[in-house]
């Protein structure tokens, strides 16, 4: 699976007047989390329960997700591994999620313009919608919660699945 750093993917668009830089702290935090993941995709492996050693770096990355979201991501992966591979990963086989749940895609887009808009902000958090410039299709929605001085992701709504999100 080929992944391009988010910053490189968005670099041509930063000069474009159509690119809207994140205006709110929650939007900025979300882009930082996605960029950090894109620089090191293995950071998500321990959260999903895949092989991958827990390190100080993976533990710090996991802190960008609420405990409820980490549990939901792990459960979704575990359910698929149980269903397709009898509960154990098999070399060369796709047993779990076949996309990146953080981005609701198989790859980071290398030529698209990310448009983030905050839908609302209340006691349940800030909902951020991710679209591609020029397309009204929602790729993902994120529920962000402010914890102390930072923002964390508390829920992810992909078109085809949700993680710690109310049922559609």
Image (spheres, rainbow, N blue to C red):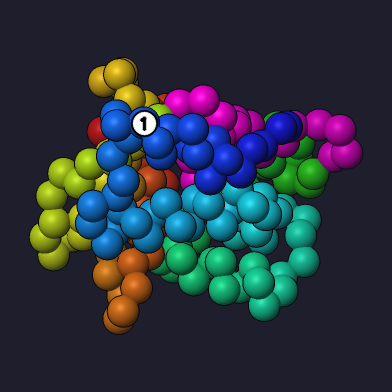
Q: Is 122 left or right of 48, judged from the image as shown?
A: left
Which sits in the foreground, 29 or 10? Answer: 10
Judge whether residue 33 is colored magenta.
no
What is the x, y in percent for residue 111?
51, 25
Q: Secondary structure at mark 1?
A: loop
Q: Residue at x 79, y 46 (%)?
A: 88
What is the x, y in percent for residue 13?
42, 33
Question: Does residue 35 show up?
Answer: yes
Q: Residue at x 61, y 43 (%)?
A: 5
Magenta residues? Answer: 90-112
What is the x, y in percent for residue 72?
47, 53
103 in relation to 60, above or below: above
72 in relation to 17, above or below: below
Which sits in the foreground, 38 or 125? Answer: 38
Residue bearing mark 1:
16
Main SS of the magenta part reads loop
Q: From the image, which quarter does the N terminus lie in?
A: top right
The number of callouts visible is 1
Q: From the image, which quarter does the C terminus lie in?
A: top left
Q: Residue at x 23, y 56 (%)?
A: 24
66 in relation to 33, above or below: below
Quadrant assignment, res 130: top left
Spot the residue most to the bottom.
148
How many residues crowd mark 1 within 10 Å: few (<14), some (14–19), many (20+)?
A: few
Judge whether residue 104 is colored magenta.
yes
Q: Residue at x 60, y 59 (%)?
A: 47
């Amino acid at each position: 699976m080929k992944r391009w750093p988010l910053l490189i993917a968005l670099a041509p668009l930063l000069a474009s007047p159509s690119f809207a830089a994140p205006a709110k702290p929650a939007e900025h935090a979300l882009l930082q989390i996605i960029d950090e993941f894109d620089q090191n995709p293995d950071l998500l492996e321990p959260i999903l329960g895949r092989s991958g050693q827990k390190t100080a770096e993976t533990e710090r990355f996991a802190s960008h997700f609420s405990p409820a979201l980490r549990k939901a991501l792990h459960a979704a992966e575990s359910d698929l591994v149980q269903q397709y591979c009898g509960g154990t990963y098999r070399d060369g086989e796709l047993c779990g999620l076949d996309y990146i749940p953080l981005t609701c895609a198989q790859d980071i887009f290398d030529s698209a313009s990310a448009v983030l808009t905050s839908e609302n902000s209340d006691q349940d958090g800030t909902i951020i919608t991710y679209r591609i410039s020029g397309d009204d299709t929602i790729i993902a929605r994120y529920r962000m919660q402010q914890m102390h001085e930072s923002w964390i992701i508390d829920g992810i709504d992909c078109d085809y699945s949700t993680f710690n999100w109310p049922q559609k």
